Image: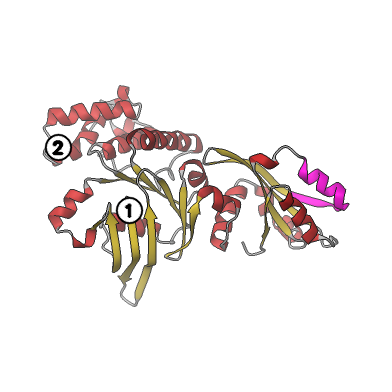
Amino acid sequence: MSAIELKKLTKTFQTKDHQVEALKDISLKIEEGEIYGIIGMSGAGKSTLVRCFNFLERPTKGQVLIEGKDLGELSEKELRRQRSDIAMIFQHFNLLSQKNVVDNISLPLIIQGVKKSEAKKRAKELLKIVELEDKEKAYPAQLSGGQKQRVAIARALASDPKILLCDEATSALDPRTTKSILELLKEINKNLNITIVMITHQMEVVREICQKVAIMEEGIVVEEGGVEEIFDTPKTKAAKRLILGDKSKDDDILQDSKVKELLKSGKKIRIVFTENSAFEPVVSNMILKFNTPINILGADTKNVGGIAKGEMLIQLTDETKNEEDIITYLKERGLKVEEVEEDV
């Protein structure tokens, strides 16, 4: 039985002038214990979708099943009880500034009727998990962004949830802090077997932590599958745009207008090196074999689900006559190869 299953989910909002279809016929299965990514650019419908997981937004059509229970068939009392199994953390932490760390973590338990002394005991246990034992009496204003998010994670874990929804949970953090939060989430997933859903626009987050991913665009899931598979061979323009955008977002030279003009000519090819193809100087051998020059537009090594992946973006010149032979040569040596379209 899946932890979360969506069946033909649609969400429509009525504005003053017209209807907005924020989600369109989405079907997904997220298995127990998975770390599942949902990625897309702003306006893709990610946050609306995640709010449907616990019925903070009620779908217009379709079903949300949590461990086989259809949330649409539950009474309000049953729905509140079910929500205690589905915790959320957010981009901006949502901590109460007038309460210290222990009180922030304790509050949800106290609201549920747990004795104050027991709630504080549980809060201190959770502070050990998120490695903030020495901050129990600190106030949010005294914490860094990463520490605030750790407190928010501890608060989310207070009710022993089975599912943790992370809505852009690392977007406000610097890269080093993001990495530490992702490591913490991986440990929580491993040690507590909590199903984690990561809502993000950051491909590096998906690469680092998720096993599976759904890519959204304009309220539709346009591609879904294993993270490694989609990274190696993205099928849709949305996936290619996210992966290539992730690769070059810090590469200012590719954004230069003169460079862009030069890059309009010649076929561009993205190559992904796997573990089996990393030992041969494939590109050098290719140049010698076919006696053809290439431009290397970018190269990088990335961690994809704990596996090192090398990738390179090359450009063949307009004078290259044997493009298909070159692509075949690269594929025969175990590389993943795809042509990069101009409008990606």
Q: Amino acid at mark 1?
A: Ile
Instruction: Classify mark 1: residues with Cα within 10 Å, few (<14), some (14-19) or many (20+).
Output: many
Tell me the residue at 57%/50% (across/down).
231
Q: Circle 2 sits in a helix, a strand or a loop, which is it?
A: helix
> In the figure, 343 relative to 172: above or below?
below
Tell me the residue at 46%/52% (across/down).
213
Q: Residue extending furthest top?
A: 134
Give the x, y percent position of residue 94. Answer: 29, 43
Instruction: Classify mark 2: residues with Cα within 10 Å, few (<14), some (14-19) or many (20+).
Output: some
Q: Is residue 89 left or right of residue 242?
A: left
Query: Which residue is labeled 1 in the image?
Result: 4
Residues at discs 1 and 2 in contact (Cβ within 8 Å): no
Tell me the residue at 29%/63% (across/down).
63
Give the x, y percent position of residue 133. Answer: 31, 23
* Residue 265 part of the magenta-drawn span: no
Using the rendered view, name the quadrant where residue 113 is placed.
top left
Quarter holding the C terminus is bottom right
Query: Which residue is labeled 2 in the image?
Result: 110
> In the figure, 218 relative to 273: above or below?
below
Query: In this orientation, which residue lies closer to the viewer: 11 or 97?
Result: 11
Q: Is residue 260 left or right of residue 126?
A: right
Highlighted range, magenta: 281-296
Give the x, y percent position of residue 203. Answer: 52, 49
Tell me the residue at 53%/37% (across/down).
306
